[in-house]
Image: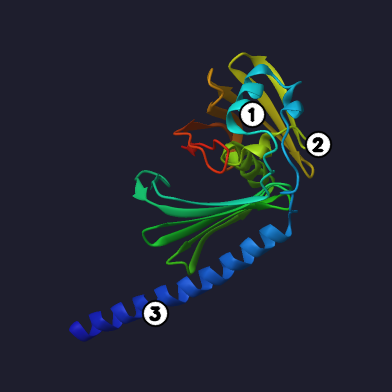
Amino acid sequence: MLVEMGMIAGVFVFVLIIGSRILKSELEKEIKNLFLSSENISDKVYSLEQTKDLPDPVQRYFKYSLRENHNYISNARLKHGGKFNPGQKWFPIQGEEYFTIRNPGFVWFGKIPFFSARDMYYDGKGYMKVKLLSVVKIIDARGKELDQGALIRWLGEAPWFPTALLPSEKLKWEPIDNDSAKVIFTDKDLTVDGVFYFNEQGQITDFSAKRYRYKDMEKWSGIYRDYKEIEGMHPDSHD
């Protein structure tokens, strides 16, 4: 009995090692493809003049979050912890995410006990992959609904790199009231929109949008808090 249990444990460890190596290789390739799909825009600089025609709460946001002549952000990387609920139970999760700005995209990787997951968007396409022990494929999803949902996610996470929300040929702002504004974002043939909410200080406090979950459009929202100054900017902590 002990021998059998030892053999099972050995096989389990072997599977974990192989799965970890495969996952690392796939993730490195996806991150490389992400960065190859975008451009370096860090030579561009922000000017307050760019925001003079924007809705009042959006102007407050850029006065708060950016300094004059701040360079544009080309890409970003973050790590996070937290809780994740895939259905009926919460699990601890550790994740990391890579972003590109000029051509919007991200690769997110997360691990919960026994499972690994990746959520991606680049070159106008969204992808989601979930594996058991990083080996057995559970989900390998793509399609127009996932494209829309992934681009909404990128837009909702853009306050982490504030220059991404400056007006451009891709991004437009429309007024709503003194505390909110509509943002419209286009990438490739896909256009999405949502509403950002602002406080008097100029901080973004909430985001709300319609996002595909499976085959249905549902309300998706985020809360922004704990702003800190990083390299002359005020990005937030996002839930």
Answer with mark 3 or mark 1, whichever residue precedes in sequence. 3
Tell me if residue 71 comes above or below residue 19 in the rendering.
above
Report x, y in % for residue 29.
63, 67
Q: Looking at the picture, which amino acid does disc 3 mark?
A: Phe
Which residue: 54% across, 17% down?
200
* Foreground of the two, 169 or 115: 169
Q: Give the labeled residue for mark 1.
A: 62
Q: Nearer the viewer, residue 121 or 149?
A: 121
Who is closer to the viewer here, 210 or 26? 26
**From what the image shows, is residue 98 above or below residue 51?**
below
Q: Residue 121 in the image: x percent, y percent?
A: 65, 51
Residue 169 is labelled as 2
- Vertical arrangement, residue 202 with respect to residue 140, above or below: above
Callout 2 crowding tier (Cα within 10 Å): few <14, some 14–19, many ≥20: few
Residue 195 seen in render: no
**Is 195 on the left-hand or right-hand side of 82?**
right
Q: Mark 1, mark 2: which one is toward the viewer? A: 1
Mark 2 or mark 3: whose residue is earlier in sequence: 3
Mark 1: which secondary structure?
helix
State the residue in front, 139 or 48.
48
Identify the secondary structure beneath mark 2.
Answer: loop
Residue 30, by quadrant, is: bottom right
Count of numbered marks: 3
Rounded to the nearest angstrom, the CA distance separating label 1 from label 2 is 18 Å
> In the structure shown, which secondary structural element does the residue marked by tag 3 occupy?
helix
Residue 136: x %, y % from top left? 48, 67
Please name the residue that numbered disc 3 is placed on. Answer: 14
Instruction: Give the amino acid at mark 1.
Output: Phe
